[in-house]
Structure formats: C-alpha cells, structure tokens
C-alpha cells in the first residue's frame, strides 16, 4: 500500500526550524536544494526538486573581502558594477559574465559604496568610505582619478553603512548619521552629523520605508554572540530627531532591507519583520549568519528577502519567490567557500552575486541547476507502524548521462541512516519512473535523505510503499 507521497506542494513549504517540526516545512536540511530553478513564466523547471547551479567564481582582480556594490548602467547591455572590498575597489563589466578587475587599492576600507550625480551636472562620482574619511573616484564620465581624503574627520570605525534615499546619501558615522547631498550648483556638500544618538550606540544598518530613514543601532561594537541593546529607529529626514523606535532582542542588527511594504532586520540568529506601526516579529531562526557589520549581506528577489548564512556561500530566501507559492524559508544556493559578507540579487537578470570572507566573489545562475547537494526531510510521523518495502521516484525529465541520486532513510537520530539505493543513468538508462526495493521494518517515524551526487536529477514525486503492522507485531 502507498503510505504517503512527496510532491511539488511539499517541496515548496521550505525548511522547518527543527527535525521534528513538520508544520514549518518539509525539510530539516536543504542547503543548495532548489525547487525554484528558472522562476519565470513558462518555466519547465520550477516545482521540480533539484539542486541549484554550481557557483562560478568571478573573484578576478578583487583584492580583499567583498563588502558592498554599486551598479552604474551606461547603455543597453552596458554597465559597471563596482565592488567595495576591505582592500579597495574592483569592478565588473556587466556586458557579459566577466570576472572582476581591480580599480583602486585603498587602505582602511569599510562597508560603504555609493554613486552620486548632481542634478544638471555631467560629472558622476563613486564615493567610498574608509575608517576615518570618505574617498571619491571620478569623474566617471571622463578620465577618473581617486581622492582618498575627499572628506576627513569621520569617527573612527570599521562600519560605515550607507544608503541612498531620494537624492541624498546617508551613512553611519558611529553614533551619528552623516550625509552627502546636492549643493545646488552641480556639486556635492557633506555633513558628518545630521542626527546623533546615544554615544554608546553604533549605527550598523540603514534603509528606508519610502518616507523615513530606518536605522539599525546597537551597543554591541563588534560581536555576534554578546547581547547588546539593539534598536531600529525611524527618522523623518527633515525632522530634528527620530520619531519611532522598536527594540530587537538580539546581539546586534546586521542589516535592514525593505521588500514591498515590509521591513526586515537580519540579526545574528534570526530574521525579523516589522514596520513603523508593527513591532519586530521573528519569522525565521538561524543556526548562524553573516559576520558582524556586513550590512550588505541582505538583498531581495521577487517578494523575498535574501540573506547570507552558513559557511558555504549559502543564500537563504524568506518570502515568496513567485506570487502563487507559499511564504517559506529556503536555502536555494550554496557551494562556495566562506561566510557571506555581501549579497546582491539586483545587478543583472538571472544572476545573484555573493562575496565571502575567504575572500571570494561568486555568481549564481538562477536559470539552471546541476550542483551536488543533500536534502533531508523532517521526521515524518506515520501515525501507525509500517514495514517499508519500496520507494518509487517519478522524475520530471528522464535520467540523462551522468545523473545520479542516492536515497537514505532514517527512523530516529539514535540509529544511522539506511542506504536505500541509487538511481542513475548508468544503472537505469533514460527512465522517468524508478522503484527501489528494500526492507525496513517497524517504522513509525521516517526521514528521507536525497543525495544529489552527479548530473541534474529532477524529481517530480516520491511515493513510499509498505504494509501496516498488526497491533501485536
């Protein structure tokens, strides 16, 4: 008899918070497992259980850890993405899938990078933040040169998060907010303190909700483990002081991102949703997250927020990748090296760029799959005891040369997983439906483990068969 099946509606429920929490998603672990390959209309991949694409390293001439990005579009299929790093500025020619090249070698770089062009002016500049000063590179429409000390006298900190709101740039200046704006005469003017906070506070994150600048602050000065007093504050930028405040019970606030009408705060062990009228609510807990102060380790794709997590250039997605799927958490991309320091899913269609502290810069292609990876379900309660005898796998496409998928089953954490068998092109040829026969008796709790070992196996449905044991069995 068929005991249960897994299919697309189950894959889309995402990753649960623990191995026995079925309500939060079908997966206990699913790093790099992606049922949203090529999430576009008329896709023939979305909804099939498979792996993400393998990351492509584009580190090239990047020197140091990637910290920030700024993209300048110059024409059809033409533009430059600048990458601010701990050792300077690099760039990627966006006309193709090119590697990064070095632009500037700069000492004491922090996590701020912004483009600015005054109204009516032809000159455009790239601003980059160092620990105690702001540098400027440009004119980008001419022969650019670098001025490291365009502004000096900033408060000494390795964390200067930046955000462009309307026609002004705001940046964290330790316990203050600084500003660069149009001077009305084709140039820019600067203020190191347009609003200040308690002297023991550090500004770690900036974004806006469309009307207010949203500021993440903490008394924590550089650690993801010791709990500080962590706050988000809303400041109407023409007001003398901030207007609203929410506390978040975490060590600090790594990053803030607006997706639609929702604000998200990424913290060391959780993701919180909030707005001006609603207090932060934990929507996802994490085992680990991006390093302290990496305010660009948060981006967006569709109606989801994208955060760096783990140690394998892994990207977590919370929300809805497509409008007709449930809100859930997935770790759709993985396979690189290092903790994530930078995520940008808004540079180029079908591409997500990721920087890590190894240091590396990677590119994921969201339109293809084919990496290796493992998906583990939660322990599925069977309600009765069964003797499991067969697992049938129905594929979305026939097996192709090189495809290989191994399946294990496990009844609890005290017993090692049982190898149920392997599906592969070498063993089965170009089939779409394969049954693996084996025996596991007296099971009332079952975890399935799918090891995507090679090729690009695409699973449509999995059926579990067996016989119910009698009451005395």
Image (spheres, rainbow, N blue to C red):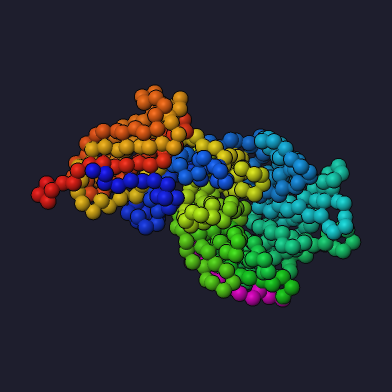
Residue closer to the observer: 119 or 407: 407
- The residue at 13%/48% (across/down) is 470
Q: Where residue 322 appears, x then y in whole percent?
A: 54, 52
For the record, the magenta segment spans 240-250
On screen, 7 above or below 175? above
Q: State the image quarter where residue 422 is shown.
A: top left
Query: Which residue sits furthest left?
Result: 472
Residue farthest along the front direction in this orientation: 42
Q: Position of residue 432 (x, y in %)?
A: 40, 32
Q: Quadrant of the N terminus?
A: top left
Above or below for 185 versus 416: below
- 263 versus 49 height, above or below: below
Relative depth, front residue between 437 and 104:
437
Which residue does the image show at 60% across and 65% down from the upper left?
A: 261
Q: Position of residue 131 (x, y in %)?
A: 69, 54
Is residue 276 left or right of 469 when viewed as pictured? right
Residue located 86% across and 51% down the image: 123
* Left or right of 323 on screen, residue 161: right
Residue 324 position in % (x across, y down): 51, 54
Q: Is residue 58 magenta?
A: no
Residue 29 showing in the rendered view? no
Number of marks present in the image shown: 0
Regarding residue 422, the answer to whether it shows in the image is: yes
Which residue sits furthest right?
Answer: 185
Q: Residue at x 47, y 45 (%)?
A: 47
- Please indicate whether residue 69 sits to the left or right of residue 371 in the image: right
């Amino acid at each position: 008899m068929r005991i249960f099946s897994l299919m697309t509606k189950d894959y889309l429920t995402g990753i649960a918070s623990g191995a026995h929490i079925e309500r939060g998603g079908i997966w206990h672990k699913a790093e790099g497992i992606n049922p949203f390959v090529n999430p576009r209309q008329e896709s023939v991949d979305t909804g099939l259980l498979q792996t993400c694409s393998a990351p492509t390293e584009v580190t090239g001439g990047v020197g140091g850890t990637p910290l920030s990005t700024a993209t300048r579009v110059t024409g059809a299929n033409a533009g430059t993405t600048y990458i601010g790093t701990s050792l300077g500025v690099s760039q990627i020619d966006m006309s193709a899938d090119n590697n990064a090249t070095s632009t500037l070698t700069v000492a004491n770089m922090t996590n701020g990078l912004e483009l600015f062009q005054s109204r009516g002016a032809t000159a455009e500049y790239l601003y980059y933040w160092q620990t105690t000063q702001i540098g400027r590179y440009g004119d980008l429409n001419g022969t650019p040169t670098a001025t490291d000390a365009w502004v000096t006298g900033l408060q000494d900190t390795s964390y200067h998060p930046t955000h462009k709101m309307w026609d002004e740039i705001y940046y964290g200046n330790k316990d203050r907010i600084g500003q660069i704006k149009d001077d009305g005469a084709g140039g820019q003017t600067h203020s190191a303190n347009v609003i200040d906070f308690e002297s023991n506070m550090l500004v770690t994150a900036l974004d806006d909700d469309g009307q207010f600048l949203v500021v993440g602050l903490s008394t924590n000065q550089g650690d993801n483990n010791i709990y500080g007093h962590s706050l988000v504050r809303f400041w109407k930028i023409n007001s003398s002081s901030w207007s609203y405040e929410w506390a978040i019970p975490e060590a600090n606030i790594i990053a803030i991102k607006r997706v639609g009408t929702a604000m998200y705060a990424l913290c060391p062990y959780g993701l919180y949703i909030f707005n001006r009228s609603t207090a932060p609510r934990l929507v996802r807990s994490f085992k680990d997250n991006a390093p302290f102060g990496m305010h660009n380790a948060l981006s967006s794709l569709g109606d989801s927020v994208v955060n760096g997590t783990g140690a394998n250039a892994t990207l977590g997605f919370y929300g809805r990748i497509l409008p007709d799927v449930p809100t859930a958490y997935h770790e759709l991309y993985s396979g690189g090296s290092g903790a994530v320091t930078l995520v940008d899913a808004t540079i180029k269609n079908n591409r997500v760029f990721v920087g890590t502290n190894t240091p590396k810069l990677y590119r994921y292609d969201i339109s293809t799959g084919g990496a290796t990876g493992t998906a583990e379900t939660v322990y599925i309660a069977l309600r009765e005891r069964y003797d499991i005898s067969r697992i049938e796998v129905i594929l979305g496409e026939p097996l192709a040369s090189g495809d290989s998928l191994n399946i294990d089953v496990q009844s609890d954490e005290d017993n090692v997983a049982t190898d149920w068998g392997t599906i592969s092109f070498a063993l089965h040829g170009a089939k779409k439906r394969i049954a693996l026969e084996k025996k596991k008796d007296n099971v009332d709790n079952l975890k399935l483990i799918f090891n995507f070992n090679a090729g690009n196996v695409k699973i449509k449905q999995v059926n579990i068969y067996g016989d119910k044991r009698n009451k005395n069995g």
